[in-house]
Amino acid sequence: MRGNRVWRVVLGLNKTVIEDVDIAEPAGGYGDSVVVVRVHPTRSAKSRCGVCQRKCRGYDQGEGSRRWRSLDLGTIQVFVEAEAPRVRCRDHGVVVAAVPWAKHDAGHTLAFDATVAWLATKCSKTAAMTLMRVAWRTVGAIVDRTWSEIEAMHDRFANVRRIGIDEISYKRHHKYLTVVVDHDTGNLLWAAEGKSKKVLTKFFEELGEERCNQITHVSADGAQWISQVVAKQCPDAVRCADPFHVVAWATDALDEVRRGAWNDARAAAKKEPKLPRGRPATDAPPRPATERAKAIKGCRYALWKNPDNLNDQQQTKLAWVAKTDQRLYRAYLLKEGLRTVFRLPYVQAVIALARWISWARRCRIPAFVELQQKITRHKASILAAIEHGLSNGRIESMNTKIRLITRIGFGFKSPAALIALAMLSLGGHQPALPGRM
Ligand SMILES: [Zn+2]
């Protein structure tokens, strides 16, 4: 009797009676031995619907005995084994009876699920799979179950005031997630597959009318489908432009200029004499346009990166651009100028943005003249973002983290599992290890 109590505590089983513990030889004589703990639910936990937990009348014995994977003991795998009878529920019909050690339809114990969910959010895919001896798809199913349960227990939309809406592409830009971030807590608030008015409307429906009215600020990337839904659902909220996206527009414009310069150089390079085969390069005639095309291609990252993060080689490339291509360098300065606006206090930012707009209007670089028009259109929401201090870094880092998770979650069967992993990792309620406070 005492031994059974020890087993119950060790395995973290509640409302469970231990019948027997044994070491079982592996099936067919291959692999390692396992510990099998034979159990049944206590009287109060017996004959309950697997879905709603209500006490029900028994139906039949179902498919007989079942095993649930439990946490390993030392180096050996442990299984909990029990009968899995079916009951007839008033609402759910004939279902397998609930068991107190596992979720409905799960092949693992609660403690096992909790450990896997914790590991999935804390360490690498390989580490989680190897340590727990499970397939990545199984991790996906467990993460999905865990998130559903946490979601049902907490009201994640309580006290939401300032939100950011963004779209994130994954699977090589073939698929999208719409995500909503809480600006005040920095948590991921909501995510769904796809990007459309319909998808985003679902968020506001889940939020409910009363909470929609409590929202004071909404930041987004300026996409029409987002702003139209926001205007309809929270008409009184201050609309802000995500600084992160505004700077990304400038980076895109700069890249257009760089590609133009590269294409020009390549066109000129075609007119240069070809290198004769087999002749040493030292004898070859000079080919400045070819060299130039190569160099422009190589300075891509030097132009993209923030100047503080450039290494020596990239700084040299940037200096080369400044010396040899006035127009491309001007485009670079325009991009950096716009980035600087977001680092200034509000009053200075207002002046700096007006100056930037008039500079870009006269710059004679079509990509930036066009960008200037877009910035003018979004001027109010850009300044609102600066005035209300909606952190650029937070949205950018959330964006980066979700992208990383979409790469890790790539092998999951369903987007639901991917979203669950993102919510468990970045939401306000992260999974806890079993048996700890
Ligand atoms: Zn039921």
Image (spheres, rainbow, N blue to C red):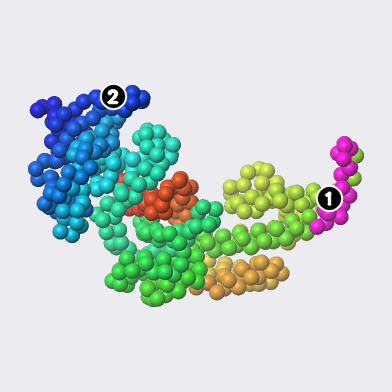
Task: Evaluate whether residue 426 shows in this view.
Answer: no
The foreground one among 40 and 406 is 40
Q: Nearer the viewer, mark 2 or mark 1?
A: 2
Residue count near mark 2 (Cα–Cα under 10 Å), binned few <14, some 14–19, many ≥20: some
Q: Which amino acid, mark 1?
A: Pro
Mark 1 lies on residue: 288
x and y, in percent, of residue 150 in the image = 28, 52
The foreground one among 76 and 59 is 59
Residue count near mark 1 (Cα–Cα under 10 Å), binned few <14, some 14–19, many ≥20: few
x and y, in percent, of residue 223 in the image = 50, 68
Q: Is residue 277 magenta?
A: yes
Mark 2 lies on residue: 25
Task: Give how far apart the Cα atoms at labels 2 and 1 are.
Answer: 75 Å
The N terminus appears in which quarter of the rendering?
Answer: top left
What residue appears at the point 50 percent right and 71 percent down from the top-left corner? 224
Q: Which amino acid, mark 2?
A: Glu
x and y, in percent, of residue 331 in the image = 67, 61
Position of residue 14 in the picture relative to residue 132 (left or right):
left
x and y, in percent, of residue 31 in the image = 36, 25
The foreground one among 366 and 356 is 366
Q: Which residues are magenta?
A: 267-282
The C terminus appears in which quarter of the rendering?
Answer: top left
* Residues at marks 2 and 1 touching, judged by CB atoms closer than 8 Å: no
Above or below, 283 against 242 in this view is above
